[in-house]
Amino acid sequence: MADVLLIIAEQNFRDEELFHTKEEMEKNKISAVIASKTSGEKSGSLGGKAKAEIALKDVKINDYKAVVFVGGSGSKQYFEDPEALEIAKKAYEKGKIVAAICIAPVILANAGILKGKKATVHHGNEQELEKKGANYINQNVVKDGKIITACGPSAAREFGNTIAKEIKNV
């Protein structure tokens, strides 16, 4: 069992947002498992490859301390995906850390868990969060309770460290 579930798109996840986030967590002795809509090899927008060990339909929220949605243009596949939205909602309801980077905070907004919460998102998607009741904050990483959001690839290492610190506080 891993500490963190990293959910990536089947194609065009953002490489740094997966790899740098994961590296920072591993430096902090936090283990992670990668999931996607289906299991198997997935491709990043910059050519990186990652193996999704688990399909979303097989995710058991109680196995993880945190659920993290990785951004990149491919993450739009989860904006309205019932399985992804349910994973975000259930993790939040169970008091898990729920995190998203780049455009992926839109998934959290669509799951209804950002209402009244401070959050950030990749530039140009602020209205998607505000429409769902989030308080947009223009910062690299924003933590509000157990919800952690980050604005994009340049924030990936800080995002990974913030998640790791929060896990150690659980």
Image (cartoon, rainbow, N blue to C red):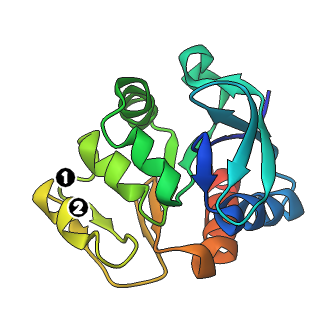
Question: Given the image, on which type of amino acid does mark 1 rest?
Answer: Lys
- Residue lying farthest top? 58
| Residue 88, above or below 103 | above
Specify few, some or many for label 2: CA neighbours under 10 Å numbering under 14, 14-19, or 20 or more: many
Instruction: From the image, tell me which residue sits under label 1.
Output: 115
Residue type of the residue flagged with mark 2: Leu
Task: Please give the residue where the numbered disc 2 appears in the rendered image.
Answer: 129
Decide: is 138 above or below 7.
below
Determine whether, in the image, residue 115 is placed left or right of residue 88. Answer: left
Name the residue located 57 percent from the left edge and 54 percent from the top edge: 70
| Circle 1 Cα neighbour tier, 10 Å, few/some/many (<14 / 14–19 / ≥20) | some
Q: Which mark is residue 94?
A: none
Q: Quadrant of the N terminus?
A: top right
Residue 83 image point, x, y percent: 42, 24
Q: Is residue 29 above or below residue 158?
A: above
User: For the residues marked 2 and 1, what is the alpha-carbon distance in whole angstroms?
Assistant: 9 Å
Q: Secondary structure at mark 2?
A: helix
Looking at the picture, tell me which residue is in the foreground, 123 or 44: 44
Q: Residue at x 71, y 49 (%)?
A: 43
Q: Nearer the viewer, mark 2 or mark 1?
A: 2
Q: Residue at x 37, y 26 (%)?
A: 86
Q: Position of residue 161 (x, y in %)?
A: 69, 69
Q: Position of residue 85 (x, y in %)?
A: 36, 33
Spot occupied by residue 91 in the image (x, y as percentages of width and height): 46, 33
Name the N-terminal-most of marks 2 and 1.
1
Q: Quadrant of residue 53?
A: top right
